[in-house]
Image: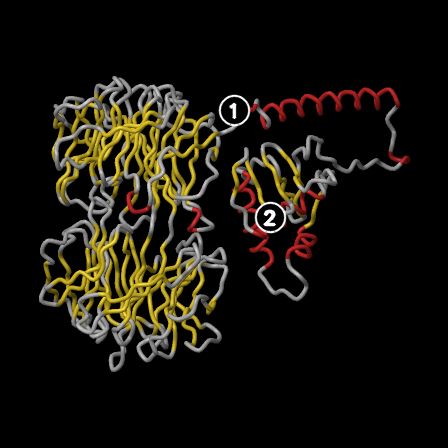
């Protein structure tokens, strides 16, 4: 690797690698790169154009006395490196894979061509005449020059074609941007947060509020083609949503449709597609059960997509306005796809299928489709934008191309009329564990502090039997593993490691063992999830049972010996009692629609929150029979998860509303509600310590803002 002796910077393509600071930059922007992928890249750059064997990389990255799953770890490091460089193994730009041998860096380094090794045949085997040798050499040289020019033009376009990402808003996590859309001419950004709807002149950064009547809370769905009106979803209270046309210059908003949200205006402004809303949940702005299309004045609404067993995302229009595309998933999110719907002819077909798909889509004027994939390797890296060309038939014509490099979850996407600029929302944040101390009467928190101090995903689900430490799953080492952290200590202890995802640590009824779920990254019937048990004091894990799509496991406390686990199968949740020692299931499964549940400390019943039925209702279901009864939590729609208090006399439930307010509730079995905590962050759930004095609270702080992308074509 030829570098200037006075510099530690290595340049290739539009990237720079600083060997001194271990930083990778793309077009001046820092790219997140972990230690092992960095070491792989540095090693390959030391030998551009030459094969670096897998054994050489092993010796470089892992000393002789280090015991790791080498193949898995190296493959994971290479994948993360490819993700950072924006390439795939199928179409390498920088790193070529040589099966069972190693890898080779194939791009020019510091302006020089990647050097390779030229092997010459022995003299006895050289039977060609000098004439033909020269002819072949000239021909090969010409082909090499032509190929190099074509490759260079494709790989190193003019500087102005480098993808540019620009952050347009700077809202804090307490007041994140919840919707945004760019004007057809690209001059203005219309966006909303918890305080109102705003118009920003992108060139200067000047911001003005959009005049609205008092108590008119709205999210920006889209612009009308005239560039002076917005389509907004009004969400004044849970359970009510409607579509409106508002002018950016002021005046009275004009209603278009009741029980509707998530609208999209056709390119010519003649039609609006939207979700029909019947029950409002925290996610129904992005997802619904039905898609309708109406004239832009709100008349002649027709239903074009409806399936009670599926959820559909906000639709996006084809350039000619004759079709819509939308995300589609079953209720347990195990099957995800993108459909194109020729709505006037009642014909739909699937164009993409990938279990990493998320709801956001945007159809460009030139026919290409922008979609979002979740990151498979690391939870905290969120998702990325991808682009694929669609034929007139709706089928994809060429491989997809990744067009973003940043971290964070991407949701709403839209673009300018000429297709040259994209606007999307990106939020950065991860579940963090806090410790709350309850007052003696159990109705208020008297202390509240953060336990996990890093930026990784940390999800608490249990306590040690003595109540001194929290048990949680975290991806701080790349793949989710099981950790334990004492409430008075800043660091966590790693209890269980694996190449699979380890989730949901739970203590058995006698406190002697820790149960956890081990899930392959791509679980299938041939690769099911597993429940393992490990001694609470540490030791070797043992297999308890295997099943497909395990989503919950819990045990009661002595004298009860009840343990239960759930799986998702189709559009139902099946819950089984099982013997924690033998792993055998006992009795028949209890069948529920999609739901979250918690097992009472005495093992007699489950508290169940059903999804999309009535979020203010808790169902109590006996674990030994089919007996049920309901508890209505009056005035608190927006409940999604539930956990029992330590004494079994009340429930702990997070509450959320459409303005991103969040609260932690303590609900007695007679329905009396105490508010333990209010937050502008997302409270996911709370797990009580065995003595009931402390709570391990999972809370997500999201700083969501609008971003602009250019030169992605």
Q: Quadrant of residue 3?
A: top right
Relative image position of residue 411 (x, y in whole percent): 34, 39
Q: Is residue 628 left or right of residue 369?
A: left
Residue 580 numbered mark, or none? none
Give the percent coordinates (x, y) of residue 303.
17, 31
Q: Is residue 554 above or below residue 403?
A: below
Residue 225 location, quadrant = top left
Task: Return the residue at label 2.
Answer: 38
Name the N-terminal-most of marks 2 and 1: 2
| Mark 2 element type | helix
Of 499 and 85, nearer the camera is 85
**Is residue 71 shown left or right of residue 581?**
right
| Relative height, residue 423 to residue 493 (above, below) | above
Question: 368 or 173: nearer the eye?
Answer: 173
State which quadrant residue 563 falls in. Answer: bottom left
Which residue is more in the foreground, 326 or 360?
A: 360
The residue labelled by disc 1 is: 161
- What residue do we see at 18% from left, 22% from top? 296
Q: SS at mark 1? A: helix
């Amino acid at each position: 690797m030829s570098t200037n002796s006075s510099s530690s910077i290595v340049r290739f393509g539009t990237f720079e690698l600083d060997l001194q600071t271990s930083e990778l930059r793309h077009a001046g922007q820092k790219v997140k790169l972990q230690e092992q992928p960095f070491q792989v890249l540095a090693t390959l750059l030391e030998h551009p154009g030459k094969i670096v064997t897998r054994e050489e990389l092993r010796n470089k990255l892992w000393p002789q006395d280090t015991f790791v799953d080498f193949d898995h770890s190296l493959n994971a490091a290479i994948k993360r490196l490819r993700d950072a460089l924006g390439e795939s193994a199928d179409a390498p730009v920088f790193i070529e894979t040589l099966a069972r041998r190693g890898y080779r860096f194939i791009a020019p380094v510091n302006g020089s061509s990647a050097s390779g090794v030229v092997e010459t045949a022995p003299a006895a085997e050289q039977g060609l005449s000098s004439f033909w040798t020269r002819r072949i050499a000239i021909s090969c040289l010409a082909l090499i020059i032509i190929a190099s020019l074509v490759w260079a033009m494709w790989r190193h376009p003019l500087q102005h074609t480098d993808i540019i990402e620009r952050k347009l808003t700077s809202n804090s996590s307490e007041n994140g941007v919840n919707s945004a859309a760019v004007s057809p001419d690209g001059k203005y950004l219309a966006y909303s947060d918890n305080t109102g709807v705003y118009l920003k002149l992108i060139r200067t950064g000047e911001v003005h509020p959009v005049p609205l009547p008092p108590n008119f809370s709205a999210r920006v769905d889209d612009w009308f083609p005239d560039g002076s009106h917005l389509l907004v979803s009004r969400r004044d209270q849970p359970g009510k949503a409607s579509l409106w046309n508002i002018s950016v210059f002021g005046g009275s908003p004009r209603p278009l449709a009741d029980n509707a949200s998530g609208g999209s205006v056709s390119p010519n402004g003649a039609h609006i597609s939207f979700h029909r809303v019947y029950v409002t949940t925290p996610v129904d702005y992005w997802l619904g059960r039905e898609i309708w299309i109406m004239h832009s004045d709100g008349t002649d609404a027709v239903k074009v997509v409806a399936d009670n067993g599926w959820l559909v995302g906000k639709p996006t229009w084809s350039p000619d306005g004759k079709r819509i595309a939308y995300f589609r998933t079953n209720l347990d999110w195990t099957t995800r796809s993108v459909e194109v719907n020729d709505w006037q002819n009642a014909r739909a077909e699937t164009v993409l299928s990938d279990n990493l798909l998320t709801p956001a889509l945007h159809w460009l004027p030139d026919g290409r489709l922008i979609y979002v994939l979740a990151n498979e390797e690391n939870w905290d890296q969120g998702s990325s934008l991808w682009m694929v060309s669609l034929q007139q038939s709706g089928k994809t014509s060429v491989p997809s191309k990744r067009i973003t490099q940043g971290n964070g979850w991407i949701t709403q996407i839209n673009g300018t009329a000429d297709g040259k600029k994209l606007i999307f929302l990106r939020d950065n944040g991860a579940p963090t564990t806090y410790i709350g101390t309850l007052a003696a009467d159990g109705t208020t928190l008297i202390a509240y502090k953060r336990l996990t101090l890093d930026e990784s995903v940390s999800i608490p689900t249990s306590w040690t039997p003595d109540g001194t430490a929290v048990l949680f799953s975290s991806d701080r080492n790349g793949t989710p593993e099981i950790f334990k952290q004492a409430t008075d200590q800043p660091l966590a202890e790693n209890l269980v490691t694996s190449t699979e995802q380890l989730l949901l640590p739970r203590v058995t009824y006698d406190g002697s063992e820790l149960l956890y779920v081990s899930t392959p990254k791509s679980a299938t019937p041939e690769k099911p999830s597993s429940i393992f048990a490990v001694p609470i004091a540490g030791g070797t894990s043992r297999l308890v049972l295997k099943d497909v799509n395990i989503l919950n496991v819990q045990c009661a406390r002595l004298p009860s010996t009840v343990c239960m686990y759930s799986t998702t199968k189709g559009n139902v949740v099946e819950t089984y009692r099982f013997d924690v020692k033998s792993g055998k299931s006992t009795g028949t499964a209890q069948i529920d629609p999609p739901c979250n549940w918690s097992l009472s400390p005495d093992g007699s019943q489950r508290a169940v929150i059903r999804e999309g039925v009535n979020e203010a209702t808790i169902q109590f279901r006996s674990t030994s029979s089919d007996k049920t009864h309901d508890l209505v939590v009056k005035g608190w729609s927006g409940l999604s998860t539930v956990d029992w208090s330590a004494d079994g006399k009340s429930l702990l439930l997070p509450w959320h509303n459409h303005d991103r307010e969040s609260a932690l509730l303590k609900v007695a079995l007679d329905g009396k509600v105490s508010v333990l905590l209010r937050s502008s962050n997302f409270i996911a759930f709370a797990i009580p310590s065995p003595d009931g004095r402390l709570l391990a609270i999972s809370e997500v702080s999201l700083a969501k803002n609008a971003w602009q992308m250019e030169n992605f074509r």
